[in-house]
Amino acid sequence: MTWRYARRYAPLVTMPITVPAYGKEAAGRLASMADVTADDGALRRFLHGLPGVDAVGLEARAATLGTRSIKTTAKAYAIDLALSMIDLTTLEGADTPGKVRALCAKGIHPDPTDRGCPQVAAICVYPDMVATAKEALGGSGIHVASVATAFPAGRAALPVKLADTRDAVAAGADEIDMVIDRGAFLSGRYMDVFEEIKAVREACARPDGSAAHLKVIFETGELQTYDNVRRVSWLAMLAGADFIKTSTGKVAVNATPPVTLLMLEAVRDFHATTGVQVGVKPAGGIRTTKDALKYLVMVNETLGEPWLTADWFRFGASSLLNDLLMQRQKLSTGRYSGPDYVTVD
Amino acid sequence: MNTVDRLSVLKTYKLYVGGKFPRSESGRVYEVTDSKGTWLANAPLASRKDARDAVVAARKAFGGWSGATAYNRGQILYRVAEMLEGRRDQFVAEVAAAEGLSKAKATAQVDAAVDRWVWYAGWSDKVAQIAGGANPVAGPYFNLSAPEPTGVVAVVAPQDSSFLGLVSVIAPAVVTGNTVVVVAAEGAPLPALSLAEVLATSDLPGGVVNILSGRTAEIAAPLAAHQDVNALDLAGAGEELAKELEVAAADNLKRVLRPAPVNWSADPGTGRLMSFLETKTVWHPMGV
């Protein structure tokens, strides 16, 4: 019982003031956890000391949160919120500057027939397309996110990954989406993964002292267990990730509600411990408005309102945008819209 | 020896959407009675969301169905006629109950419906010859017009002829490559829902024909306003409803076939067949 009360009132008594993961103070907060990241043994003990995940409970909770009915004005608000949280993504070998420019134009005015439609949060491209995207977006305020570190496999030497990152930052990327070395993580070399994330974070620094925000992709479809997802979430947040992201969208299993819920819970616990606010980005496989609303419900229920902005929650998606636009048109006109009334990309 | 009373097995009629038999999304049903008011069965009372799902299914099926060769489409429709023939007794009983006909008259209706289906099936590879052709032009070009299917057609099935009328509006739309969402006759939906079972077992790709039962006005309104529906057949809409639907359909310039009194037993002609076609014309240099 004491423990329960301690937990309930802990935030009121001990909760440190929230600082964003990309802020200057975050480093100091992370330093308070330095003992667990001091060496390989300590890190392993800490990660394996995290409580195991109740898989059945997690899936049931995620499924329950997916049953909420969001209608009328709440739905309209949620659709606009989801729109503003999209990282509009094109990560194809066949990407051309023209295609990236078209995507940027769509990001600025998702619905050309309705200027009241919010713009997306970011455009996500490969590093060589960053300059093109940056130029096309101009002063719109939309960020350019670039995948880096030998995306999507992450199978390259560290210097190559760092050069990849620096290139993207130099080309003007506002956000870097890195992939972790799943091979190292799965074989238990946690310190390697930790050091790599730290090194990439340093490579995100710009000459003027600011830095590109770092999103760390776990590729949860390859991590096998929920326990691993919880461990890697803590690992990445301890290493200084600004955002944690589920997947690359390039493997069979992408973002699922239970995995995202688990990461949201890790972010909540990390925030409760250190006061550092970290963002979450589910990516891949979110195609319908209905799915997007389920994720927003999970964010609200797990982390609360501070995370319900494009600064702290993102959808990595491409086809989701069209479905959101069709639903938006349905709400404003009362008639079902069709794929003829949104762009093909 | 004891005679054992058999349990009566009542049939659950369901919608037909995308090749599957779902219940209405709303979970509602309504009572269907025969012409004397005796209860026959409960039919699903479809909602606007079922209509939405049906349009999605029809749109998904359109590429494959319109892209199939005319010969292939004809064969599949002929196969449907074969299946109809095998279920003749069931349809005779349902038509007789729904329309209050004698067995002989109902049989005549069902026979006429099967014949009509075969007749339309035959048109699949012939419609291009009468709706298209070479155009004389003043220049060194071959100029050819060919009919193309319009797309997704929403059909309000006739209220007065539950089976012959139904077949007479579905077959001409699908034979040319359109996919359809059918709103079955409100008072007599059972033959339509049984037709779905025939379609599901006869090589017709799922989603080409989707059948909804319920309140005609409730289901037809969202279909008429739907931006992803290309044409509207108002065969079974009353005067007032037809006007409303036509207004709603005007927004994205749907092709609309207005209701008109039709004798379903008479020779149908090619009118309906030609109603849901677009003409594609190509210019090809002669190379002189």
Image: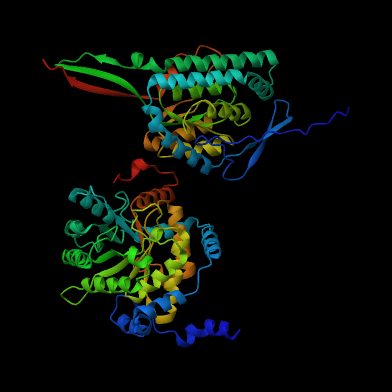
Q: Quadrant of the C terminus of chain B?
A: top left
Q: Residue furthest bottom?
A: A13
Residue B241 place in picture, x, y as percent: 52, 33
Name above or below for residue B204 compared with residue A91.
above
Q: Is residue B147 left or right of residue B117?
A: left
Q: Residue furthest right?
A: B1
Q: Could you say which is closer to the camera, residue B266 or residue A15?
A: A15
> What color scheme is it?
rainbow
| Residue A107 sits in quarter | bottom left
Q: Could you say which is closer to the camera, residue B273 or residue A204?
A: A204
Residue A121 place in picture, x, y as percent: 31, 62
| Residue B63 sits in quarter | top left
Residue drawn at x 51%, y 61% is A62
Question: Can residue B261 be seen at all in this image of the molecule?
Answer: no
Q: Could you say which is closer to the camera, residue A54 or residue A22?
A: A54
Residue drawn at x 33%, y 56% is A116
Q: Could you say which is closer to the camera, residue A58 or residue A71?
A: A58
Residue drawn at x 40%, y 76% is A44
Q: Quadrant of the N terminus of chain B?
A: top right
Q: Is residue B91 left or right of residue B64?
A: right
Question: Can residue B233 be seen at all in this image of the molecule?
Answer: yes
Residue A336 place in picture, x, y as percent: 43, 44
